[in-house]
Image: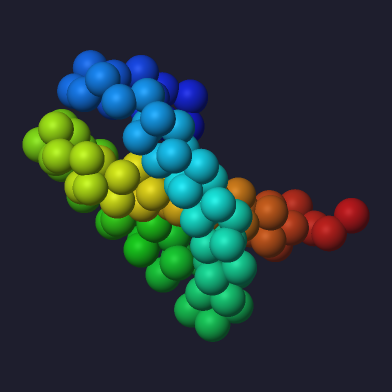
Amino acid sequence: MKASFKSYGLTHFKDDLFLTMSGMIAFISSAFAKFGWGAALDKFGFHKSFAVILGIQTVVCLSLHHVASEKTAFLIWIVMTFICEGGYYVLFPPLASDIYGAS
């Protein structure tokens, strides 16, 4: 989604500045949300944290087509998608360390 949100957005409205700003807001939100995903991982564990990410991303991806023509909703959906994608990068290194060992 990170590579194609702008192309997808251009099919619904022709506001390149808005799409660029949406990308900037989404990337910054994703960076800060990684701290939250790390805290969630520590508090709730991998399975619950991953279930939340999957649930959010499933709803967002299935409904993106229906909200894409509204700029505010599109921005929120793109931010949520980026936040979820960032969560995967936080959750999987500790899981791999648990499975394969730290060394």
Instruction: Please determine whether, in this image, residue 3 is positioned above or below residue 72.
Output: above
* In front of the other: 82 or 89: 82
Q: Could you tell whether 39 is left or right of 80 in the image?
A: right
Q: Could you tell whether 80 is left or right of 12 in the image?
A: right
Instruction: Please determine whether, in this image, residue 73 is positioned above or below residue 18.
Output: below
Q: Position of residue 34 (x, y in %)?
A: 58, 61
* In front of the other: 15 or 59: 15
* In front of the other: 96 or 56: 56
Residue for point 35% across, 35% down: 18
Q: Position of residue 21 (x, y in %)?
A: 44, 39
The quadrant in which the N terminus is found is: top left
Residue for point 45% across, 67% down: 49
Q: Could you tell whether 69 is left or right of 91 in the image?
A: left
Quarter assignment of residue 62: top left
Q: Position of residue 68 (x, y in %)?
A: 18, 34
Q: Is residue 35 visible?
A: yes
Q: Is residue 85 visible?
A: no
- How was the colour assigned to the protein in this rendering? rainbow
